[in-house]
Amino acid sequence: MPNTELIENVLNLIGIFAFALSGALVGVQREFDIVGMAVLATATALGGGIIRDLQLGDTPPTALRNLWWLALPLIATVVTFFFHPVVNRMRRTVLVLDAIGLGVFCASAAAKASAFGVGALAAIMLGTITGIGGGIIRDLLAGEVPAVLRKDSKLYAVPAVLGSTFVVVAWGMEQRGIWVQAVGAALICGMRLLALWRGWGAPVPRLVTRAAD
Amino acid sequence: MPNTELIENVLNLIGIFAFALSGALVGVQREFDIVGMAVLATATALGGGIIRDLQLGDTPPTALRNLWWLALPLIATVVTFFFHPVVNRMRRTVLVLDAIGLGVFCASAAAKASAFGVGALAAIMLGTITGIGGGIIRDLLAGEVPAVLRKDSKLYAVPAVLGSTFVVVAWGMEQRGIWVQAVGAALICGMRLLALWRGWGAPVPRLVTRAAD
Amino acid sequence: MPNTELIENVLNLIGIFAFALSGALVGVQREFDIVGMAVLATATALGGGIIRDLQLGDTPPTALRNLWWLALPLIATVVTFFFHPVVNRMRRTVLVLDAIGLGVFCASAAAKASAFGVGALAAIMLGTITGIGGGIIRDLLAGEVPAVLRKDSKLYAVPAVLGSTFVVVAWGMEQRGIWVQAVGAALICGMRLLALWRGWGAPVPRLVTRAAD
């Protein structure tokens, strides 16, 4: 059905644009020039998928075979360059778009990894890495400790793991329609937004004694 | 002989577990949440081998094809989450396990690279990178300058290079039994422990004049 | 014509050596030991090309198949270890060699990517990444925000993009001789040196309001 493919494509592009905006915004905050912004936007938007494809041996990575995937981060850079105060005021919108991107990236990556025949745990990991990898690269390039690792981050990787697991389990039960990915992506997106709204975080180890060096 | 394969597997798993513990411990020290700990543990334990396999074109990487390789870092994370004061007090044990891991990773990577037909110098480099790569990724993710680069680190890469060289030279002389890897790993592990015990470091360039910016 | 190949090889080696020197020098400034210097030199000199080859699926990467490519960073490390005050005083020379390296790396990567059949935009990106990737890895390993992203950096990625575009467009017009790469490399090198001389930088977004956290 071409319609489902169309929907998947549109959601993917939304995710790429949202991730690219978040990358370009970090560039503005760190006072990078437009080159730095473009590198951050591109790495954030495409980094996770490229890591996935390299591990699956699917080269050149999908990102390099899609003109729009390559062009959108540059467009997001130009938009942010001129209108970053507006983009910044729309942070809430960007967070929602980012949650959509996280969901779509993880769900489609978990399905792709399953289709490539890797094991269940590996597929779940690849799904998760595809969703959180771009943001990790963004933060490293910006000289910050990746947000997803920090205790003040609201649940981000946990929804990614759970949603990817849903897709992989469904795949194992021969449920491989596009609706599986859609439900997985919606699960991730919804759980992420709920965590943001409710302030849910992941558990932090109790510091009984100060960890020695 | 299935026994040699078994031994190699067990040593590999010890190395993965030790590397994962060191990653999870860094996560505790940096006050990451459990997600951050799991990412650090996994990246430390599997990062070096994944870099090696990507360069050899052996995809998906071995790490993604072994359930235990994927599961051990998660187990190490849970153990460290609950018992990190104990793990921390066992630092000395972790350092010894880490040295075993370094030895096994380098020696088996040097052999694998040779088997893939890359040149001697390339095989030595891949052996070394496989051993030290995971720790470098761990430190970068934790926002620290990689320990292996710093002058206060005790010899770590040097044993890796020498042991990898031993394996590659033996391979070139048609000595390709598992014992070659065993001796190479023991060499690396022993030299590393000796360096820790004796406080040996690599030479540092003499700063005649302060290096200008 | 073997002569053109010879010239390309020599230029490539000059670029590798210059990049390696810049990596080793950063190691001296950060007071790393000789191991840290060697890792920085190697990563700076070969990192960009390895990223390119992994994405093109050309494994093992060219860098691992060339003895001199692997040996030169080690030689640069030893030279810098003993003579870093001299190397440091030759910063201007190193900057010129670095510009040559940037030009050669981008132009040959853009041509290689085109020959591998990736699209025009992807080839331009791969050309650019090959040129700037090594320096980004160098700065990350040294615990610094990559110079190429910062606003105080003089034009570096922009010449890389323009020169790569030239090569890719020429390739699309069936102009595929070595002279295309030579002109592309000269364009990049010349523009970079001009930017250094004139102090040209890339545009920086106007900070109307302080970007909120």
Image (cartoon, coloured by chain):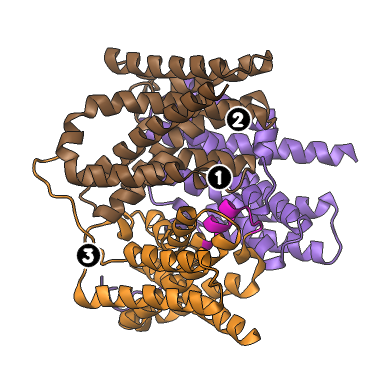
Chain colours: A purple, B orange, C brown
Q: How many marks?
A: 3
- Amino acid type assigned to the residue bearing label 2 in the image: Lys
Q: Secondary structure at mark 3?
A: loop
Q: Is residue A118 left or right of residue C39?
A: right
Image mark for residue A158: none
In the foreground, A119 or A154 = A119
Query: Residue C129 in magenta?
Result: no
- Chain where mark 3 sits: B
Residue sticking out furthest to the left = B208
Image mark for residue B201: 3
Numbered range of the magenta stretch: B49-60
- Chain where mark 1 sits: C
Q: Is residue A82 above or below residue A15?
A: above
Image mark for residue C112: 2
- Chain where mark 2 sits: C
Q: Is residue A45 above or below residue B115?
A: above
